[in-house]
């Protein structure tokens, strides 16, 4: 599923308090690509991700997904598109406290009115794949941060989304949990050819991507393409961070 | 800094605060109006019994009103503190001194209370004249109302306002303190091991309550008093406890069952909404129960009040079917007065009657019986006797006070048997109580007899009744009326009983003093206007007070439900936002808000209507009265007003959710 972002801009606040979160960004993501979006805090990564995922509307510009201009769709159609074609993983998990693990995971399928049999099959498959079978009846509050993020990933992936959005997915995780999650994401990207867009400021996390774009002050500053060697790619990302002068703001992981 | 935090809290919860302030201001406004009416000189001069009766009743109701308003303020004021629990705990974590946080809670409450009092007193100042005019209009007093707010009333209001504000502010500071001391984030526990049996017990109580009600209603006559009392106590416990346990156990358990039926739960948003509703229900079950019971009480009281008004009005019509009535003793004076005043008579009636002794078959009581011929009866205005059963020229009609009066039905027999002195015994199934010239004009029974029977009847006393209708009233002056009033109950009949009915003597008496025997006095005249003034004043005052109380109660109960719906905690807001993020469109979230509003408003009103109906049916059965029409009318009004509040709540609730989602 190809994504084309054309000259989008987004401001927050009004008049003198206005903040230009995104000034003028153009971007193209190929089908099956694992794209990283990096930048310091407040650079506009999450805003860009939210606009592409239709959770926010740009002030101007277009977001074309498979030729459909998402900015022109009605709220209801956008929600339907999100439900059917997209999956989401957030730093703060965004799990529903009222529901237990199983209910959280199957929610996107229930929303699609999938059959009970299919829901059960998909749930079993997903929990086996992510090795969280024993968690299914637990309450969300009783899970560790890592477990919560895996559950969030399961919820994002159960529908077999064509695009997966991940906003700082490893931000709340320890290195071991982060590695497990990233390996799963890479597996999905390889096997299912799912397009993944991931915002992060962690170089180690970004090194799992096939390409990383760097956002600074609301514009795309640069990009680095994975040469096929993750260590080398990690070095390139670190160098780029130093180049754009944001090194002190970046969380350079030592787990490379 | 304090003010900035307080201002932000007000901004964040502006809809909820607005509802609370309006509800409090309305209550304070009504209280202030009632208090100011107590001393109003216009009411004292225009309503003769204001100082001796109505003023004290108004004062009592104003005290009762403000007491209820304080209960509301104390209870609902805590909602806002609870809503800010997370914020206060964060201040505490950041190292803000506990005293400072308490002061924030204190200032917030104080400002809200002061604003409510200021608006409430302003409402009273602006609308006092309106309410005064309304009261006079309802009481049928044709006079202007002058605005007056004495300095005493004003000082009293200011003092009550300041003291209550301080009390509620301190109360909320204590609430903040308790919140801060409570370090554990109490997650509401499902406790289904408790809820399932409790729910089962609740349904059992409710169904057994219904069963006992049916038994009581169907054979109440056969029940012993002790047994009836036991059944009533059981009913009271069964309905109160039953409805609470249904809220506490049955409804959450039902939602849990639905949640586990996969073909229902795994469809669309149900997977979320069943659990969300259940959590909200568990959180609010005490409030919902409290509102249910108060609504039941309101419906019962309103139905009884409305019924009492209808009965009083109906009885007044029975007592005074003509605008002016006289008998042979008062007719001369009245006719002179009418002539003197140039009263315009539109219709005039005259009927001769015979009085003798009769024995009521049901209890063997010997009383006077006044007979009217069928032909004379037919000449009377149809409206005066419309409620009596229709008779043919050969039938008897027995009129006895208490039968067929609207609303009453005191053990009306199927057949009345009346023994008549020196005449044939009468048996008739035609029994009524609409006395053609008003019930006060004679004592005992009145019998409409076939002409043949009437002509043969030997009368101990003869009398003639007169009745008039006028254009623009009878125009009797106060002096004339006072003179006429002196003749009331000055004449009547005396019964000297003997072993045999035929030997019992009945004679006319005038201002009796030392007669031996049983005396039955007649009123000699009946004036509709005099009674109408009293009925209008009492019923108008009753309607005024009851209407104010019911509207205030409705606003209070409605606002509690509205606030409970609006004040979602952080986790509940977050969940609705998350749903939207993962692809639930706003229409579906709106549906959740709509369903929640519907069940929050509908379930209490359904229970309230059921419970109040049962109470009304039981009262009706005990007292042999039927209140079904007023009950239906009151319920329809109540449901309509509740529906409007529910709809407005839904709009506000959705608006606040929509704002959070954007």
Image: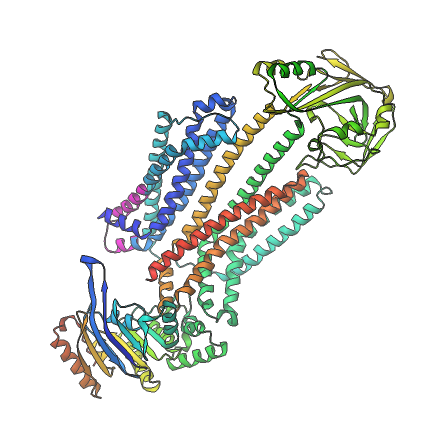
Q: Quadrant of the C terminus of chain B?
A: bottom left
Main SS category, magenta section: helix
Q: How is the image coloured?
A: rainbow
Q: Residue A200 vs residue B555: left or right?
A: left
Which residue is pictured at 45% across the width and 36% down the height? B65
Indicate whether B144 appears above or below B477. Answer: below
Q: Which residues are magenta?
A: B88-111
Indicate whether A116 appears above or below B161. Answer: below
Work out whether residue B547 or residue A208 is closer to the camera in this orientation and state it: B547
Report x, y in % for residue A197. 28, 77
Which quadrant of the figure has residue B659? bottom left
Which quadrant of the figure has residue A254? bottom left
Work out whether residue B608 or residue A95 is closer to the camera in this orientation and state it: B608
Report x, y in % for residue B242. 56, 52
Which residue is pictured at 33% across the width and 50% down the height? B14
Indicate whether B500 appears above or below B293. Answer: above
Report x, y in % for residue B208. 63, 53
Q: Residue furthest bottom?
A: A228
Which residue is pictured at 59% across the width and 27% down the height? B532
Taking the image as drawn, is residue B185 in sight? no
Number of numbered markers: 0
Assess whether residue B104 is covered by the magenta stretch.
yes
């Amino acid at each position: 599923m190809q994504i084309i972002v054309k000259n989008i801009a987004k401001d927050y606040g009004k008049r003198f308090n206005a903040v230009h979160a995104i000034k003028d960004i153009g971007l193209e993501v190929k089908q099956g690509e694992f794209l990283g979006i990096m930048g310091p805090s407040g650079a506009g990564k999450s805003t860009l991700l939210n606009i592409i995922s239709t959770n926010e509307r740009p002030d101007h510009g277009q977001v074309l997904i498979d030729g459909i201009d998402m900015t022109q769709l009605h709220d209801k159609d956008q929600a339907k598109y999100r439900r059917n074609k997209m999956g989401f993983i957030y730093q703060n998990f965004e799990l529903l406290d009222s529901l237990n693990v199983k209910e959280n995971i199957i929610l996107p399928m229930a929303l699609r009115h999938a059959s009970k049999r299919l829901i059960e099959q998909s749930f079993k498959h997903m929990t086996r794949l992510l090795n969280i079978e024993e968690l299914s009846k637990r309450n969300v509050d009783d899970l560790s941060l890592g477990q919560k993020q895996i559950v969030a990933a399961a919820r994002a992936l159960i529908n077999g989304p064509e695009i997966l959005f991940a906003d700082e997915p490893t931000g709340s995780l320890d290195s071991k949990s982060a590695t497990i999650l990233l390996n799963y994401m890479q597996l999905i990207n390889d096997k299912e050819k799912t397009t993944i867009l991931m915002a992060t400021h962690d170089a180690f996390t970004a090194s799992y991507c096939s390409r990383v774009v760097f956002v600074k002050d609301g514009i795309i500053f640069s990009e680095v393409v994975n040469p096929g060697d993750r260590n080398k790619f990690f070095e390139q990302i670190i160098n780029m961070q130093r180049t754009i002068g944001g090194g002190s703001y970046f969380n350079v992981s030592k787990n490379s | 800094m304090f003010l900035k935090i307080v201002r932000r809290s007000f901004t964040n919860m502006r809809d909820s605060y607005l509802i609370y302030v309006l509800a409090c201001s309305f209550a304070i406004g009504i209280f202030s109006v009632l208090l100011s009416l107590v001393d109003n000189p216009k009411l004292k001069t225009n309503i003769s019994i204001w100082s001796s009766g109505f003023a004290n009743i108004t004062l009592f109701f104003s005290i009762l009103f403000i007491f209820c308003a304080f209960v509301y303020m104390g209870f609902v004021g805590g909602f806002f503190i609870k809503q800010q629990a997370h914020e206060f705990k964060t201040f505490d974590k950041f190292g803000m001194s506990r005293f400072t946080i308490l002061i924030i809670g204190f200032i917030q409450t104080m400002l809200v209370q002061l604003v409510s009092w200021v608006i409430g007193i302003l409402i009273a100042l602006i609308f006092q004249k309106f309410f005064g005019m309304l009261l006079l209009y309802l009481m049928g007093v044709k006079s202007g109302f002058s605005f007056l707010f004495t300095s005493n009333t004003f000082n009293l209001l200011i003092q009550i306002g300041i003291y209550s504000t301080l009390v509620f502010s301190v109360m909320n500071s204590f609430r903040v303190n308790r919140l801060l001391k409570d370090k554990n984030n109490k997650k509401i526990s499902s406790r289904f091991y408790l809820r399932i049996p409790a729910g089962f017990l609740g349904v059992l109580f409710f169904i057994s309550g219904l069963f006992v009600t049916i038994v009581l209603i169907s054979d109440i006559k056969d029940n012993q008093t002790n047994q009836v009392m036991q059944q009533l106590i059981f009913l009271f416990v069964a309905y109160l406890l039953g409805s609470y346990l249904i809220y506490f156990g049955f409804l959450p358990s039902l939602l849990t069952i639905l949640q586990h039926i996969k073909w229902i739960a795994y469809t669309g948003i149900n997977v979320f909404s069943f659990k969300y509703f259940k959590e909200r229900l568990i959180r609010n079950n005490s409030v919902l129960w409290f509102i249910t019971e108060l609504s039941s009480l309101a419906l019962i009281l309103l139905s009884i009040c409305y019924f009492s008004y209808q009965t009083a009005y109906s009885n007044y019509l029975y007592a005074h079917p003509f605008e002016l009535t006289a008998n042979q003793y008062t007719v001369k004076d009245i006719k002179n007065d009418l002539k003197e005043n140039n009263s315009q008579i539109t219709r005039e009636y005259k009927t001769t009657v015979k009085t003798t002794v009769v024995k009521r078959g049901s209890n063997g009581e010997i009383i006077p019986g006044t007979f009217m011929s069928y032909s004379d009866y037919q000449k009377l205005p149809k409206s005066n006797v419309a409620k009596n059963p229709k008779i043919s020229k050969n039938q008897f009609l027995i009129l006895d006070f208490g039968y067929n009066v609207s609303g009453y039905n005191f053990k009306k027999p199927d057949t009345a048997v009346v023994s008549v002195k020196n005449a044939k015994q009468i048996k008739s199934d035609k029994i009524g109580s609409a006395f053609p010239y008003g019930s006060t004009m004679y004592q005992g029974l009145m019998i409409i007899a076939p002409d043949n029977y009437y002509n043969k009847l030997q009368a101990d006393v003869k009398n003639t009744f007169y009745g008039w209708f006028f254009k623009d009233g009878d125009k009797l002056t106060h002096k004339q009326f006072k003179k006429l009033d002196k003749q009331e109950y000055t004449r009547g009949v005396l019964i000297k009983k003997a072993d045999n009915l035929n030997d019992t003597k009945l004679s006319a008496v005038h201002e009796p003093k030392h007669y031996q025997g049983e005396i039955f006095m007649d009123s000699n005249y009946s004036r509709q206007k005099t009674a109408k003034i009293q009925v209008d004043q009492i019923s108008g005052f009753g309607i005024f007070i009851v209407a104010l109380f019911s509207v205030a109660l409705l606003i209070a109960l409605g606002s509690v439900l509205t606030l409970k719906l609006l004040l979602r905690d952080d986790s509940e807001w977050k969940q609705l936002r998350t749903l939207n993020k993962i692809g639930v469109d706003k229409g579906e979230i709106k549906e959740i808000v709509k369903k929640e509003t519907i069940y929050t408003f509908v379930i209490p009103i359904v229970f309230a209507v059921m419970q109040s109906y049962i109470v009304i049916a039981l009262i009706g059965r005990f007292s042999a009265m039927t209140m079904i029409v007023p009950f239906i009318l009151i319920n329809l009004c109540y449901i309509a007003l509740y529906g409007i509040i529910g709809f407005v709540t839904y709009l506000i609730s959705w608006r606040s959710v929509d704002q959070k989602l954007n």
